[in-house]
Each structure stands twice: as structure tokens, then as C-alpha cells.
Image: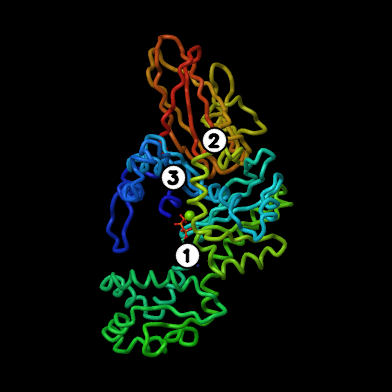
């Protein structure tokens, strides 16, 4: 989540563990990826497959990332993957897209006939990936050639399983009292982690059945006695939850009322329903008939029922074992990344320019005169507008030029905005998002024109440049701000 919420991701970006101890995020992420890689290789080795049927160099790694992440967050993950040894250019798959690929093949209906019908060309559907941190949504249409076209830009928010966890923790914290809870977290870390694991279990409960949660009873009782001079059971009986949470005598369990249990999902499910509704507002989605739910929290009966009730005219489909849909879809993507035909650009991208002054559009205070021509400073020269559909890898080109004789490096500022038509580079929400540094291969005393191609619709923004009149194209490193 830290990566989702941060606009700026620097090399020294730190993350904290439960006790507040900080460590370099790059180290944590790359070590985690490396662990998974090594675990997989060890598994192949143990089975006698490595070096026999599987050659390590033939393995293509696919890194999945939520579609709503920013370009800097994607680049950060790529850097970590490279550091972890996944090769120089691991494939990046966007998670709800990967899940979509798996949903095309998953036997989500009982008869083979239904499977064929549900994945026919022309079908429009939504994939809602409800994970731990985020809910991530794509809306797609299946094309005649079987490839997939995005109809909306990826959207989503921080409304996954951990939001429900927070609500449960809140109940426990209010039950014990915030001070006692803080002491519990600090002095009984192991028990606190056990409590988190118990949450994983209670979240899966069927609200129509008994809803019980295991608690670290001995530790709770001890800490209540120490700090409140009362037993845990008495503390609970005097709390605001006395009618909705009951201690099950002689066990290490508490029982939740159905009403309280359902209410703990409310804020998360309302936000998910809101996100789905917003996606359906697009006129292109009028005939959308299916909503696939994937990701861990989509296994929750509460979540499933809420979404089904909110969209009675849609088929809401929860494929079997939906928690692994992204993983398995990523494997399909790795074999055929061209399966995504087009995407919607989610930001406008542009560069700073001095457009010819237009009194109907520009502010007089920004007027400047350049070579006798009235111009407007700091205008946003758009390379592409947010919400534009692009085929994967579609190019937008711009010619830059050197400003000094024998200049060997040219640096340009790239700006982005979530809005479709920014006018100035300092408009609201407009950001200087990256610097592009281009090495001039043959510096000269004359002005050199540099043709720069910006490729949109890939899983990440890509930029290449070449000096006009030459054929040598080079990748331009993007330094995100
Ligand atoms: N049967 C279930 N009922 C309710 N919640 C569940 C169930 N199974 C898993 N979860 C919850 O799903 C979440 C994990 O889902 P998932 O593995 O899809 O997340 P993730 O991919 O790691 O997160 P993100 O997509 O946000 O990066 C956890 O919060 C977990 O508690
Ligand atoms: Mg996920």
C-alpha cells in the first residue's frame, strides 16, 4: 500500500515492520522476490526437473502489479525484480488483466457450452480483483481475434481485506481500551500476530452460521487484570460490545453477532460497489453483462452477496479458487503478452512549452515575447490525453533540439495530469513526473534535432530517441520524480 499511496518513490524509501522498525523498501521487496524465485528453483531441483527438463535460462519471469499503480511504483518494482535476479527485463503483467486471462479459460460454469458462450467475441465484462490492500478493476471487451480490449482505464482504491482487518482490530481495541491494546501489541508481539492470523479465519465466516474468533485469551486476561484489575470477560461485559461480542466460557473464543460481523465489512464493500458503479457509467459498458470477482476477499460470502445484491441485472461470477487467478493468468500472459490489444491511457502526458498566445485560452500574466512573437509560458504541450484508447505500444512523437553548440546531453521534463486537457504545467493535479536524459551521440556546433517516441499502452511507459538523420534508436531512461 505504501507504493500505491506515494507519489514520489525515492531510492531511500523505507518501510516499517509491526514494531515500527524501518528498513529500505528496495531491500525488503527484492529479498522477498528473490526468496520466491529461489523457492521455485529449489522445488524444481528437488523434483529432479532443473537442468533436465527445465533449463534455468529458459524460464521467463512475470512480475504482477496492480493496474492502478503509478509509473514510478511500477518502475520501482521492476528495479527490485532485476535486483532479485529475475533477469534484465522481467515481463510485467497488470494484475486484473492477468486475472482476466485466467477467467477466459476457467471452468466457471457447469457446462462446457456456457464456457464457450461466456467468452465469445463481443462480450464485455468486468474483472474486480479484491485483494488484501486494494481492489483493482478492469473492464474489457473480447475481440474477434480473441484478444482483449480495455474499455475503461484501470481503476481501484484501498479497499481490500486489510480494511476489514482494521475494522475487526478496532472492535478489539475498543473492547480492551486503546491503552491496553497498545501494551498488548508491544509486550505480546507473538500473540498479536496470532490474533492477526485468527482474523484471517473469522473473515471467512458465513454470516448465517455461528461466527467465532480465536483470541489469545490467557494474554488478554493477564493484561486486563494488570491494567484494569478485571478479568477479560468482565472487561468485555462492560464494553460497548457487551451485546454483540460474547466470550464463550472456558474457551479461547469470542462470538460475534451477525449484525456486528456484517457491519465490519460495510465501508469496504460500499467502496467496492461504488467503484463498480463508476465503471458502469461509461456508455461503452451499457451491454456489459458479467462481473468476475477474483482475489482473496472475493471468496468472502459477505462480499459476494453485497455485490450480487447491488447489481441484480449482472451475472456475478466467482471462479473456483479465485485467489490464484492473478498468478495463473500471469503465466498465460507470460506466454502471450500480445493478448491485450489495447488499453486506455490513465494520465495525460506532456511537456512544457511556450505556445503562441491565444487570448481566449491563456492568462495575460503568462504572456512573453520570443523573437517578436507573443507567446504564453509554461503551457502543457500534450503528447497524449488521459482516457485515450491506444493500441499496445502506440507512439506519440516529439522533436526536441539542442540549445547550445556541442551539447552532449539533453534533459527534458515530462509532466502528467489525471485530467484530460491541462492548459498549464502548474495546473491543479499536474506534476513534473519525470526527467528524460538523452545522450547526444554526435555533438555538433549546429543545432541537433532529436526525435523522441513515447510509447503508450504498454504495461509501463517507454521512451526511445534518435538523432534526426540517423538510424540509431536508444532507450531513454525515465527518472521519475
Ligand atoms: N475465504 C476468504 N474470505 C474472506 N477473505 C479472504 C478469504 N481468503 C482470503 N481472504 C483475504 O484476502 C486477502 C488476500 O487476498 P489476495 O491474495 O488476493 O491479496 P493480494 O493479491 O496479496 O493483495 P493486493 O492485490 O491488494 O496486492 C487477505 O486480506 C485475506 O484475508
Ligand atoms: Mg492481488
* Label 1 CA crowd tier, 10 Å (few <14, some 14–19, many 20+): some
Q: Are marks 3 and 2 in contact (CB under 8 Å)?
A: no
Whichever of labels 1 and 2 marks the residue nearer the N terminus, that label is 1
Residue 62 left/right relative to 97: left
How far across and how far down the image is residue 353, in percent?
Answer: 53, 27
Q: Is residue 190 visible?
A: yes
Q: Please name the residue that numbered disc 1 is placed on.
A: 163
Query: Quadrant of residue 302 in the image?
Result: bottom right
Q: Nearer the viewer, mark 1 or mark 2?
A: 1
* Above-or-below relation of 341 to 294: above
Residue at the farthest top position: 445
* Above-or-below relation of 156 to 240: above
Q: Please name the residue that numbered disc 2 is placed on.
A: 349
* Above-or-below relation of 170 to 401: below
* Residue occupying image coordinates x 58% and y 31%: 394
Whole-Å distance between the Cαs marked 1 and 2? Answer: 33 Å
Q: Nearer the viewer, mark 3 or mark 1?
A: 3
Q: Are marks 1 and 2 in contact (CB under 8 Å)?
A: no
Whichever of labels 3 and 2 marks the residue nearer the N terminus, that label is 3
- Mark 3 falls on what kind of element? strand
Q: Please name the residue that numbered disc 3 is placed on.
A: 63
Amino acid at each position: 500500500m505504501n507504493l500505491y499511496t506515494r507519489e514520489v518513490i525515492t531510492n531511500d524509501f523505507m518501510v516499517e515492520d509491526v514494531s515500527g522498525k524501518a528498513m529500505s523498501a528496495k531491500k525488503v521487496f527484492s529479498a522477498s522476490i528473490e526468496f520466491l524465485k529461489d523457492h521455485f528453483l529449489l522445488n524444481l531441483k528437488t523434483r529432479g526437473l532443473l537442468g533436465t527438463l527445465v533449463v534455468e535460462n529458459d524460464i521467463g519471469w512475470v512480475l504482477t502489479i496492480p493496474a492502478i499503480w503509478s509509473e514510478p511504483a511500477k518502475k520501482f518494482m521492476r528495479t527490485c525484480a532485476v535486483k532479485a535476479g529475475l533477469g534484465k527485463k522481467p515481463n510485467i503483467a497488470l494484475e486484473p488483466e492477468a486475472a482476466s486471462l485466467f477467467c477466459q479459460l476457467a471452468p466457471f460454469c457447469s457446462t462446457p457450452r456456457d464456457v464457450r458462450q461466456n467468452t465469445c467475441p463481443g462480450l464485455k465484462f468486468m474483472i474486480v480483483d479484491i485483494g488484501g490492500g486494494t481492489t483493482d478493476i478492469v473492464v474489457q471487451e473480447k475481440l474477434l481475434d480473441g484478444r482483449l480490449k480495455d474499455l475503461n482505464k484501470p481503476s481501484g482504491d484501498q479497499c481490500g481485506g486489510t480494511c476489514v482487518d482494521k475494522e475487526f482490530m478496532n472492535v478489539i481495541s475498543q473492547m480492551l481500551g486503546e491503552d491496553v491494546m497498545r501494551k498488548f501489541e508491544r509486550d505480546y508481539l507473538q500473540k498479536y500476530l496470532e490474533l492477526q492470523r485468527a482474523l484471517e479465519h473469522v473473515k471467512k465466516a458465513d454470516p448465517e452460521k455461528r461466527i467465532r474468533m480465536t483470541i489469545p485469551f490467557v494474554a488478554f486476561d493477564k493484561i486486563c487484570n494488570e491494567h484494569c484489575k478485571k478479568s477479560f470477560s468482565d472487561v468485555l461485559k462492560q464494553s460497548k460490545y457487551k451485546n454483540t461480542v460474547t466470550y464463550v466460557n472456558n474457551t479461547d473464543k469470542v462470538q460475534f453477532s451477525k449484525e456486528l460481523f456484517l457491519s465490519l465489512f460495510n465501508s469496504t464493500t460500499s467502496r467496492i460497489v461504488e467503484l463498480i458503479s463508476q465503471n458502469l457509467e461509461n456508455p461503452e459498458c451499457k451491454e456489459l453483462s458479467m462481473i468476475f470477482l477474483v482475489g482473496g476477499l472475493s471468496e468472502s460470502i459477505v462480499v459476494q452477496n453485497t455485490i450480487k445484491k447491488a447489481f441484480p441485472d449482472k451475472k456475478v461470477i466467482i471462479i473456483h479458487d479465485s485467489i490464484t487467478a492473478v498468478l495463473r493468468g500471469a503465466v498465460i500472459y507470460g506466454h502471450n503478452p500480445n493478448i491485450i490489444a489495447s488499453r486506455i491511457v490513465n494520465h495525460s502526458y506532456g511537456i512544457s512549452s511556450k505556445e503562441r498566445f491565444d487570448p481566449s485560452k491563456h492568462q495575460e500574466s503568462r504572456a512573453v515575447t520570443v523573437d517578436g512573437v507573443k507567446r504564453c509560458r509554461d503551457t502543457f504541450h500534450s503528447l497524449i490525453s488521459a482516457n485515450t484508447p491506444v493500441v499496445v505500444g502506440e507512439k506519440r512523437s516529439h522533436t526536441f533540439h539542442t540549445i547550445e553548440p556541442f551539447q552532449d546531453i539533453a534533459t527534458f521534463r515530462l509532466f502528467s495530469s489525471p485530467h484530460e486537457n491541462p492548459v498549464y504545467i502548474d495546473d491543479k493535479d499536474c506534476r513534473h513526473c519525470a526527467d528524460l536524459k538523452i545522450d547526444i551521440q554526435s555533438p555538433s556546433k549546429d543545432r541537433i534535432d532529436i526525435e523522441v517516441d513515447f510509447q503508450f499502452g504498454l504495461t509501463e511507459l517507454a521512451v526511445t530517441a534518435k538523432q534526426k538523420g540517423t538510424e540509431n534508436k536508444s532507450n531513454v531512461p525515465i527518472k521519475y520524480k
